Image: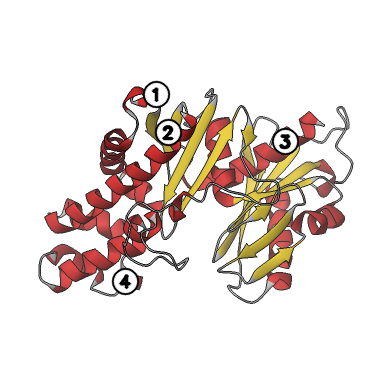
Amino acid sequence: MAETTKKGDGRAVWIGVDIGGTKILAVAFDDRMKPLGEDRKKTKGRSGAEESIQRVAAAVEGAIKAAGLSAKDVAGIGVGCPGPVSMEKGVVLSTPNLCWKDVPLRQILEKKFGVPAAVVNDVDAGVYGEYAMGAGKGARCVFGIFPGTGIGGGCVYEGKIVCGRNTSCFEIGHCRVMPKGPICGCGRRGCLEAVAGRLAISSAAAAAAYRGEAPALLALAGTDLGCIRSGDLAAAIAAGDSEVERVVRRAARWVGCGASLVINLMAPDKVILGGGLVEAMPELYLEEVRKGAMKHVMPSLRGVAEVVVAKLGDRATVTGAAAWARGLAVAE
């Protein structure tokens, strides 16, 4: 890793980066994690690593400029990436939507900007953001579960992101909750993601719309799965589509079942719910996840974990990535 910034050299700005499937968000933060400026770039989809990394660097430069600063003011960079990551090596092992494989992102960024860089899984970064600055602040152990197109999970224990020796972990979306259930994208049956991810919800909701049981959703988004977004589901429920509400509530209870597995294993202080589905329907998800978790958790552990909704929204990953980079620098 590049040399850690020394106290007193005048640099106390941290850059957080969130690399999504279609966009890159970079935010400059001060030492208290107050945002100073930001920039957004498109990822260019599956164009390959080289061009996307150039856009990551451009977003970092844009955030620095938007904050009215220069590169010499930056103390470190933290990046949240989708897919498995080797935190120790700073390598992105793979990104399904971007066609990255074994990309040494930390090395690339440190060489370009001359400051320490940290690379973490995006959900891990989001959970760390909530731990440091959001709904998990002050907790000893925080588990985050983020239902969306997939279902991501992450855990922070005593200030450290829990990970394996060579890769990020807590793939809660691929824990089996329904033996002989529907096929998941990973190729196995009955994974949490296969029964409670947005694709599963949209599929059941679209079928209801096609059958005439969800007229509001039919008017809002039709029956094309690719057109049904979290906001459409929430709007359809608000308009009175009881069948859509039943589908979403059932999926949220499955998320609670998945959360119970981690509660039984780690007894976290808090289970934090985030992601697009939760942001669109926070009260519904909070109610049903609590029910699902309490139904399946070991009786002696009921009440140990408080289930709460994330506070940072789509800023969780950039905040967590920057805070993680800051924490590593302080530790060294």
Location of residue 179 (image quadrant) = bottom left
Badge 3, how many Cα within 10 Å: few under 14, some, many 20+?
Answer: many
Mark 2 in CB contact with mark 1 (< 8 angstroms): yes
- Residue under label 1, please give it: 304
User: What is the distance, in whole Å, between disc 3 and disc 2 at their CAs?
Assistant: 29 Å
Q: Residues within 10 Å of mark 4 (few under 14, many from 20)?
A: some
Dot 4 or dot 3: first in sequence order is 4
Residue 77 location in percent, x, y? Answer: 74, 46
Closer mark to the observer between disc 2 and disc 4: 2
* Mark closer to the chain start, 3 or 2: 2
Q: CA distance from mark 2 to mark 4?
A: 33 Å
Q: Gap between marks 4 and 3, in whole Å? A: 41 Å
State the residue position of label 3. Answer: 326
The tag earlier along the polypeptide, 2 or 1, is 2
- Disc 3 residue type (three-letter): Arg
Q: Which residue is mark 4?
A: 225
Q: Residue at x 79, y 56 (%)?
A: 109
From the image, tell me which residue sits under label 2.
263
* Extreme residue toward the front, this view: 179
Which type of secondary structure does the marked residue at label 2 adopt? helix
